Image (tube, rainbow, N blue to C red):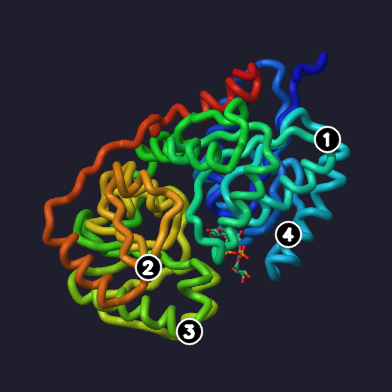
């Protein structure tokens, strides 16, 4: 794997949940002599609030290459990334291509790298919802199949990969790299002024996010979820930073107690999560962050690819029916906070393990 000029590692980020997974790996590898890093941004997410603010908050370097892929249908977006990344991979010819998570950019780059015969490392491998209606599930399964190095965040990932016949020597249980970012950023997040700005008292509000196509693309499904949030907002203030996909479909919905705001940066969002009485979400990453912060989380989906957040953490699946969500929120608000325990190897050192395996092979 080593060459005379050192090892070259090419990292790819594209969408919001990629940034906090790649930032700590970049930082770890920067410390290692003889490692050259290339950072590629596919441009799947491009708004300042969906991308730039995360680079600033996470202390990431400017991307070396920007593909400018942008939005589109799944085929358009995946194809655009594929066409744009191919000459970059040919020119850079890295020893390893590191992809993270389960977004369209992840699979698009893995497909091209595999056909060029490049080694692929997948960060956050092995997660499975077993729900093939989710585009992310397709992206996860195929990216894992194409990768030579599979870095899992939890033991269920190892089991899922073994069940799919992925050779054991490709799989490395390294822990959760998102929690590296969370632990590193928490002291700075505590200095955020977001609570004052939104006139919220710590521990006295709920935080909500919604962006899954199954929840927001269909007007009836979205209306039901918004009515559930309004039902919870009758009990305590609910802050709702709205993803652009959701915003485009919400029109002018309002409800007393519901604070509808623009998407937030990493530090402000972390500050709000850390002090929330309750979080309601359909995001994968937020299920993990609430577990790490011991904050009760209601997941507004029927399944999760992150079961450890339920068995070990503070997460509960409540689906998308207001008749289930509002009572579950009432119950969570009246109960003693469920502290949960930190899942194995969610210790802030996952990137260190990944860097070692990438460079030393063990
Ligand atoms: C993508 C990921 C999803 C991830 C989410 C996090 C896939 C299949 N989905 O979903 O797994 O949880 O990111 O946010 O890769 N838009 C903007 N500005 C932007 C980006 C998008 O306005 O910077 C709008 C566009 O109208 C776009 C829509 O949001 O069409 C959806 O964006 P897209 O990247 O296609 O999917 P997400 O819903 O963000």
Q: Secondary structure at mark 1?
A: helix
What's the distance in space between the residues labelled 3 and 1, CA to CA?
A: 45 Å
Instruction: Name the quadrant containing residue 148.
Output: top right
Q: Secondary structure at mark 4?
A: helix
Q: Residues within 10 Å of mark 3 (few under 14, many from 20)?
A: few
Residue under label 1, please give it: 92
Q: Residue 72, percent across and down? A: 70, 69
Q: Determine whether 164 is above or below 321 in the image.
A: above
What residue sits 29% from the left and 68% below the top?
A: 238
What's the distance in space between the residues labelled 2 and 4, CA to CA?
A: 29 Å
Residue under label 2, please give it: 240
User: CB of residue at label 1: within 8 Å of ligand 1?
Assistant: no
Mark 2 or 1, closer to the camera: 1
User: Is residue 96 among the parts visible in the rendering?
Assistant: yes
Q: Earlier in the sequence, mark 2 or mark 1?
A: 1
What residue sits 42% from the left and 62% below the top?
A: 282
Is the Cβ of the residue at disc 2 closer than 8 Å to that at disc 1? no
**Any mark on residue 78, and which?**
4
Is the Cβ of the residue at disc 1 closer than 8 Å to that at disc 4? no
Quadrant containing the C terminus is top right
Q: Secondary structure at mark 3?
A: helix
Q: Residues within 10 Å of mark 2 (few under 14, many from 20)?
A: many
């Amino acid at each position: 794997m080593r060459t005379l000029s050192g090892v070259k590692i090419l990292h790819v980020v594209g969408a919001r949940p990629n940034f906090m997974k790649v930032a700590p790996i970049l930082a770890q590898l920067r410390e290692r002599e003889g490692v050259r890093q290339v950072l590629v941004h596919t441009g799947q997410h491009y708004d300042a609030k969906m991308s730039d603010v995360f680079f600033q908050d996470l202390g990431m370097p400017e991307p070396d290459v920007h593909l400018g892929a942008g939005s589109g249908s799944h085929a358009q977006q995946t194809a655009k990334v594929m066409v744009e990344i191919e000459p970059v991979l040919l020119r850079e010819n890295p020893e390893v291509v590191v992809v993270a998570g389960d977004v369209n950019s992840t699979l698009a780059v893995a497909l091209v790298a595999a056909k060029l015969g490049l080694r692929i490392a997948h960060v956050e491998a092995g997660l499975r919802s077993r729900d093939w209606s989710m585009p992310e599930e397709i992206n996860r399964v195929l990216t894992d199949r194409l990768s030579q190095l599979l870095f899992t965040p939890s033991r269920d990932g190892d089991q899922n990969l073994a069940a799919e016949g992925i050779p054991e020597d490709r799989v490395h249980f390294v822990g959760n790299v998102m929690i590296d970012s969370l632990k590193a950023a928490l002291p700075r997040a505590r200095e955020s002024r977001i609570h004052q700005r939104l006139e919220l008292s710590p521990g006295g509000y709920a935080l909500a996010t919604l962006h899954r196509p199954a929840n927001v693309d269909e007007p009836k499904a979205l209306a039901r979820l918004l009515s559930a949030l309004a039902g919870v907002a009758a009990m305590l203030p609910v802050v709702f930073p709205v993803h652009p996909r959701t915003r485009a479909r919400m029109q002018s919905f309002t409800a007393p107690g519901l604070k509808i705001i623009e998407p937030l940066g990493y530090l402000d969002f972390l500050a709000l999560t850390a002090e929330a009485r309750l979080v309601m979400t359909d995001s994968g990453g937020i299920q993990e962050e609430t577990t790490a912060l011991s904050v009760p989380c209601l997941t507004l989906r029927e399944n999760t690819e992150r079961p450890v957040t339920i068995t070990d953490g503070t997460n509960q699946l409540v689906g998308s029916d207001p008749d289930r969500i509002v009572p579950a929120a009432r119950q969570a608000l009246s109960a003693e906070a469920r502290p949960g325990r930190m899942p194995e190897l969610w210790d802030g050192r996952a990137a260190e393990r990944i860097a070692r395996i990438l460079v030393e092979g063990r």
